Image (spheres, rainbow, N blue to C red):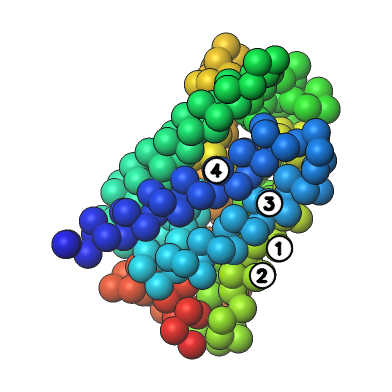
Amino acid sequence: MPNIIRRMGAEFLGTFWLIMGGCGSAILAGDQIGKVGISLASGFAVLTMIYAFGHISGAHLNPAVSLGLWAGKRFPARDLLPYIVAQVLGGLLAGGFIYLIATGKADFNIGNFSANGVGSYSPGKYRVLPGLLCEVVLTGMFLLVVMGATDKKAPAGFAPIAIGLALTLSNLVCMPVTNTSLNPARSTAVAFFAGGAYVRQLWMFWVFPIIGALGGGFIYRLLSPEEQEQHTKPQAFQQTMSG
């Protein structure tokens, strides 16, 4: 099997699991576990997939992360489209899978279906500017954690823990504002099931996280001038997983 197909398969399955963990916990168990539980579920999902697939594809699981790693000279441009396609398809499959489970309950109310929104569609009714600030800044900081934790000088084997905790923290901060995207594949996975304004606002949850991720990747390069281009090693977590 060609290497890019294996890596796309890992990104597809990893993103499926991430959406199942984050959005699935919110939709199916949100009333029981609350915002802290949902945030932890998202962090655990990304942590487990980095350990499972980090050595295969880098476990980006997020178009913004792939683009941020490209900006940070950690990922080749030629692999961006295959990765993003695999991530979005994996997310959509997870969204459909959650929908089939959720609608099996007689009194299920689809509501926002864990979709992202601003204004009247924000959980806390926050306007566009606060939503932009949260998504851009938190995605940028998330990229800094990803870049730093997977640096060859970082302690080997601990990157998944740092990244999982960073996603948990980001969810705790951003959930009241936009329902926390930071990930265009995550937003796309559920927006079409919620429909209406959630689909019309979806573009924001592609643009805002990508701006933040590109900024985070570029800033890490500025902070770490010895950072070398690694276009021949697209796996963001390979050095960490291999020790």
Residue 65 position (above or below residue 208): below
Q: Are marks 2 and 3 in contact (CB under 8 Å)?
A: no
- Element class at badge 3: helix
The residue nearer to you, when weighing 204 against 98, is 98
Residue 106 position (above or below residue 186): above
Residue of label 2: 162
Q: The disc labelled 3 sits on which kind of residue?
A: Ala
Picture disc at residue 19: 4
Task: Point out the frontmost of discs 2 and 3.
Answer: 3
The residue nearer to you, when weighing 34 against 201, is 34
In which image quadrant can residue 239 be found?
A: bottom left
Residue of label 1: 165
- Mark 3: give few (<14), some (14-19) or many (20+) Cα within 10 Å: many
Residue of label 3: 41
Give whichever of discs 1 and 3 has the lower sequence position: 3
Q: Are marks 1 and 2 in contact (CB under 8 Å)?
A: yes
- Element class at badge 2: helix
What residue is drawn where x is 47% and y is 29%? Answer: 96
What residue is drawn where x is 45% and y is 54%? Answer: 14
Give whichever of discs 2 and 3 has the lower sequence position: 3
Question: Alpha-carbon distance for marks 4 and 2?
Answer: 19 Å
Give whichever of discs 4 and 3 has the lower sequence position: 4
